[in-house]
Amino acid sequence: MNLEERIIRTIQGALEKRPEITLESHLREDLKVDSLDLLMILSGLEDEFSITIEEDDFLDVITVNDIAVKMRARGI
Amino acid sequence: MELREFYKRFSLDESLAVGTGHNPYYLRIDSGLDEKIQVNGHEMIDLASNNYLGLATDSRVKQAAIEAVQKYGVSLCGTPIATGYLDLYQRLEEKLASFVGLEEAIILPSCYQANNGLFSSIAGPQDLIIVDRYAHSSLIQGIKAAGSKIRPFLHNNLEHLEGILQRSRGYRQVFVVTESVFSTEGSLAPFKEIVQLCETYRALPIIDDSHGIGVLGKSGRGILEEQRIEGYQGIYTASLGKALANSGGMISGKKGLIDYLKYYCPHLVYSTALTPSVLAGTEAVLSIIQSEFGVIKQRLVTYQQAIYESLIEGGFTLAASEAPINSIQSGSKESTFILAKKLYEQGILCTAFIEPSVPVGDGRVRLIAGANLRQETVAEVAEIIKRIGRS
């Protein structure tokens, strides 16, 4: 499973509604992610990749792909 | 700073209310919570307030409040640490702690303040706070103010919670925070199991029992009684403005912690103490609960069931409620406002929840039939609901 697939699986696990998620999905508009959902997603990513994430570093993400870009920038 | 730009930021988007022709918020109430209430000059049935036991206008409670005003006046004009610590205040602290079965309690001006003040007094950046995804705004805001690491868990999902607890190492303290009754849904937390998980993973449980106190348990003592949780070692908060029919909030737990909060919880130390009438009114409600809870609760359950059946017959989709709450899953915020409007036009006052109070697109219309209503009034409500459902 590649990085993007692992991110999408993590987001699916964090959102109870399990919507269809692609790299282009907008977190707020398409997936209806609110601030607590975002915290759930970040917690899930911490567990999935065994890293620590500062919430502030991810406040500007708009799409799922933005998360992937940030993760790659951390060398994952 | 450009003043005009600053104030422009605060313009309110009224398109939802304009588009649906209804704004369910800040409706002007011109009466007390009687059998029928006056709303914007119309007579309506109150299914919106949290007056579960119907004691907000009980003559004995009113009398207790009046006598307190006659004896003490309307305010002590001071915080509890200064001139606000009346004999009534101390007595109510003791009675509340004893009522919920814990060592000691403090009383704040609201449960919002209790929840806001608690976390910044007991937690900091080295700590982890694990919180139910659906927890009330007061808990979330309080938790955020503490600056701790926050990890939400899926609503009432013990497996998810345990997974987080298993991975939570290296923190100074770990807290698990939830509510007894999630008021938009009526769902109940599996709190006994949460307490057990906390024991296993050496975390401290914190419960907000605002919709449970005076409602849950065989004698109305709340979630700890309901789920037979003995020797609770965690922290307990609750509102005094719902079933207890007054105002204010409480924090209860171990004596050492409560003594500490009396000096180090700024929301308590720097807030004017609750007024004599409220203190006496709450005490009177506790006394009524202790003598009449069985009869009152029976009415509450009967009314909830009657309304539930009418909603099902009317074709509404309901959240699975385990409390005296009926919660209609109303979908988008537009649909939620439209349903609230239909009920309003038929003389029923409900509570409409849209985001951010609930997840986006997952609106709720909540109906709580207080025990003060007459059976005929509840039958009238049931007929209206069925009619709206069929239309």
Image (tube, rainbow, N blue to C red):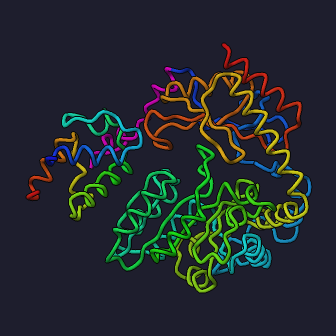
Which corner quadrant of the image does residue B372 belong to? top right
Residue B196 locus on image (x, y percent)? 55, 70
Residue B341 in magenta stretch: no
**Image check: B203 left or right of B391?**
left
In the image, what residue occupies the spot 74% across and 30% down?
B309
Which corner quadrant of the image does residue A75 belong to? bottom left
**Image check: A73 left or right of B264?**
left
In the image, what residue occupies the spot 35% across and 38% down?
B8
Instruction: Check the picture and name the quadrant holding the C terminus of chain B.
Output: top right
In the image, what residue occupies the spot 56% across and 27% down?
B337
Residue B3 in magenta stretch: yes
In the image, what residue occupies the spot 39% across and 62% down?
B163
**Image check: B243 left or right of B3?**
right
Vertical relation: B178 (above or below) B52: below
Number of numbered discs present?
Answer: 0
Residue B140 locus on image (x, y percent)? 46, 58
Furthest residue in direction top, as rendered: B391
Boundaries of the magenta span: B1-19
Vertical relation: B379 (above or below) B64: above
**The one of A49 and A29 positioned closer to us in this rendering:** A49
Residue B390 locus on image (x, y percent)? 68, 15
Vertical relation: B141 (above or below) B121: above
Which corner quadrant of the image does residue B47 belong to? top right
Residue B26 locus on image (x, y percent)? 61, 38
